[in-house]
Image (tube, rainbow, N blue to C red):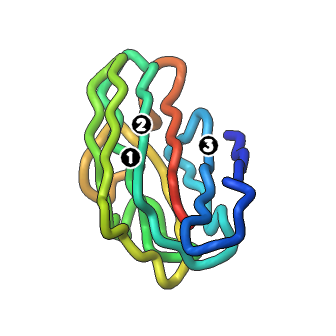
């Protein structure tokens, strides 16, 4: 997994950041911003050969495989989807994520194939 950050560069109420996470797995990525945030857009590119469930948690360290995700997005194989929420979704504890082949809290198997990439637009 790799995480990259891009900022709008402006310091105002319109200042946003783009965070790209490549090849997210079922092992999870804890508190990858190290801050609270509001998410306005989630872009998922499932380049793998099977369905991927991207699970996002309002938590610094969820127990993957047990903790129910706050947001779960199903993305079919070789599909690119974008979800946008105009008012934003607040993450007041921190933001963590993982992806697996199963829905719900299950973390048994990573998405099949070459990977799942996720991008966020947030403050």
Does residue 31 appear to the left or right of 57 in the view shown? right
Percent coordinates x, y for residue 113 in the rendering: 47, 18
Tell me if I can see residue 71 in this picture.
yes
* Identity of the residue drawn at 38% across and 16% down: 49
- Spatial CA distance of label 1 from label 2 is 8 Å
Q: Considering the image in quadrants, where does the N terminus appear?
A: top right
Q: What residue is rendered at 42% in x and 40% in y?
A: 43
Tell us which disc is closer to us: 3 or 1: 3
Q: What is the distance, in whole Å, between disc 3 and disc 1 at their CAs? A: 14 Å
Which residue lies under the disc numbered 3? 20
Residue picked out by circle 2: 44
Q: How packed is label 1: few (under 14 Cα within 10 Å), some, or many (20 or more)?
A: many
Q: Element at badge 3? A: strand
The residue tagged 1 is 54
| Label ID, residue 78 | none
Quarter of the rendering occupied by the C terminus: bottom right
Q: Residues within 10 Å of mark 2 (few under 14, many from 20)?
A: many
Between 123 and 118, the one nearer to me in the picture: 123
**Discs 1/2, front:** 2
Q: Could you classify mark 3 by the number of other residues whose Cα lies within 10 Å: few (under 14), some (14-19), or many (20 or more)?
A: some
The answer to whether marks 3 and 2 mark residues whose Cβ atoms lie closer than 8 Å is no
x and y percent of residue 17 in the render? 62, 57
User: In the rendered structure, are the residues bearing label 1 and label 2 in contact, judged by CB atoms less than 8 Å apart?
Assistant: yes
N-term-proximal mark, 3 vs 2: 3
Residue at the location (61% across, 43% down)?
20
| Vertical comparison of 89 with 107: above or below | below
How many discs mark residues in the rendered view?
3
């Amino acid at each position: 997994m790799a995480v990259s950050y891009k900022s709008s560069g402006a310091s105002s109420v319109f200042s946003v950041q783009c965070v790209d996470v490549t090849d997210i797995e079922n092992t999870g990525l804890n508190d990858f911003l190290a801050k609270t945030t509001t998410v306005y857009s989630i872009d998922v590119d499932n380049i793998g050969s099977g369905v991927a469930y991207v699970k996002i948690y309002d938590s610094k360290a969820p127990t993957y495989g047990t903790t129910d995700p706050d947001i779960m997005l199903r993305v079919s194989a070789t599909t690119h989807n974008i979800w946008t929420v105009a008012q934003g979704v607040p993450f007041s504890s921190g933001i963590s994520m993982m992806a697996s082949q199963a829905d719900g809290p299950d973390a048994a198997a990573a998405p099949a194939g070459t990977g799942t990439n996720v991008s966020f637009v947030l403050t």
